Structure formats: structure tokens, C-alpha cells
Image (tube, grey):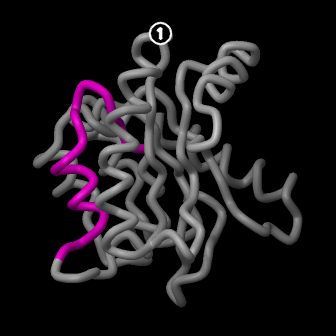
């Protein structure tokens, strides 16, 4: 994204995406100065994406909730990026793993979370098929309008039997309707 954001926009348009998502920060880019620089980059990229008819989002993991030089990176990003330009793709598993309550973020920053990863956690904190763990997805989905939800992605990293995992997760999602 830093090297050629115009190309990122072009690629997003080719595949018909409505969103460009910054999905991961390398370990070497997680210092206080890096997060402060990222705020500026996200606002800039968000403006460019918007001008191109796209939206920009940031995907969380658990490390964004570890305090860094007196601030919590995720909160820094939410508080200092333009809500009209920068959105967030909330990963429910990583929120849970970090001990965070998505509801609190929806209340404090309504409309900023149009993308969600529905990924569950078992009692030991490992990833589980959606609906097989402890995350109360129906309660979270009841807050979809407040959050600004447009798309929810069922996900499980490193499933031993991916197709079985997809089917179990899909059955759970359908049971919530």
C-alpha cells in the first residue's frame, strides 16, 4: 500500500471490490511511531479510496490492544482517523482473544465497523468453528445496525478439515436467522 496505492485501487476495481483492507502489520511496524504514522497513511489512503469510489478498512488482531508508549494502538487508530474515510474490519476472534468487548466499540464508534470476521474461540482460547465456541454471535449481530455492518465473513484459520468446518459454521449461522 505504501509503495503504490494507485495500483492497489486499480486492482480492487478489477476484482469488483468495494473495500480495500489493510489486513496485517508486520512485527517490525508495530512501534509507537509506526502507529502514529499509520494514522496519517490511513487518512490519506482513505481519501484516495473514497475519490475512487471505494472504502478503506483496517483489520485487527490482538496485538493492537497491547499498550504501546502509553496508548492502545487500536484506540489511537479509531480516535485519530477520519470516520468518513477509514473504517474497520472487526475480527471477533481476535477481539475475544484480546479481552475486548465489541459492543463497547460499536457504542463509542457507531457505523465504523462495516466488515466483520465471524471466527469463534473455544474454552482454551483456540480457534473453533463458528457456533462451536464461546462468542455470542447472535448478541453481536443484534448490534449490526449500530456497528454499520455490511458484510460478515465466516472464517477459521488452519482448520484441520476446512470443508467440514465451513459446513458446521454455515449450519450455525443459518440457525441464527
Q: Does the magenta-highlighted stretch encompass residue 105?
A: no
Q: Does the magenta-highlighted stretch encompass residue 85?
A: yes
Secondary structure of the residue carrying numbered label 1: loop
At 11% across and 48% down in the image, what residue appears?
A: 108
Closest to the observer: 164 or 102? Answer: 102
Q: Residue furthest bottom?
A: 124
At 65% across and 53% down in the image, what residue appears?
A: 155
Drawn side of residue 118 relative to residue 164, left or right? left
| Image position, residue 33 (x, y; %) | 33, 69
Q: Quadrant of residue 45?
A: top left
Closest to the observer: 5 or 163? Answer: 5
Residue 99 versus residue 136 in the image, above or below:
below
Residue 43 versus residue 97 in the image, above or below:
above
Closest to the observer: 26 or 147? Answer: 26
At 37% across and 32% down in the image, what residue appears?
A: 44
Q: Residue furthest front?
A: 3
Q: Which residue position holds label 1?
A: 53
At 64% across and 33% down in the image, what residue appears?
A: 4
Where is the N terminus found, in terms of image quarters?
top right
Drawn side of residue 3 relative to residue 105, left or right? right
Residue 8 versus residue 42 in the image, above or below:
above
Count how many numbered circles sit on residues in the image.
1
Which residue range is magenta in the image? Answer: 71-88
Drawn side of residue 167 relative to residue 115, left or right? right
| Image position, residue 93 (x, y; %) | 49, 66
Q: Residues within 10 Å of mark 1 (few under 14, many from 20)?
A: few
Closest to the observer: 149 or 171? Answer: 149
Q: Residue furthest left?
A: 108
Amino acid at each position: 500500500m505504501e509503495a503504490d496505492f494507485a495500483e492497489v485501487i486499480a486492482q480492487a476495481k478489477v476484482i469488483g471490490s468495494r473495500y480495500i483492507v489493510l489486513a496485517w502489520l508486520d512485527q517490525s511496524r508495530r512501534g509507537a511511531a509506526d502507529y502514529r504514522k499509520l494514522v496519517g497513511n490511513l487518512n490519506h489512503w482513505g481519501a484516495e479510496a473514497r475519490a475512487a469510489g471505494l472504502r478503506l478498512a483496517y483489520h485487527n488482531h490482538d496485538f493492537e490492544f497491547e499498550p504501546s508508549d502509553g496508548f492502545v494502538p487500536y484506540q489511537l487508530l479509531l480516535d485519530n482517523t477520519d470516520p468518513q474515510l477509514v473504517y474497520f474490519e472487526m475480527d471477533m476472534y481476535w477481539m475475544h482473544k484480546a479481552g475486548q468487548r465489541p459492543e463497547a466499540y460499536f457504542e463509542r464508534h457507531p457505523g465504523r465497523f462495516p466488515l466483520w470476521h465471524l471466527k469463534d474461540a473455544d474454552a482454551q482460547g483456540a480457534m473453533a468453528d463458528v457456533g462451536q465456541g464461546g462468542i455470542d454471535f447472535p448478541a453481536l449481530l443484534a448490534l449490526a445496525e449500530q456497528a454499520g455492518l455490511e458484510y460478515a465473513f465466516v472464517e477459521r484459520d488452519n482448520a484441520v478439515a476446512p470443508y467440514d468446518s465451513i459446513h458446521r459454521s454455515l449450519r450455525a449461522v443459518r440457525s441464527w436467522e
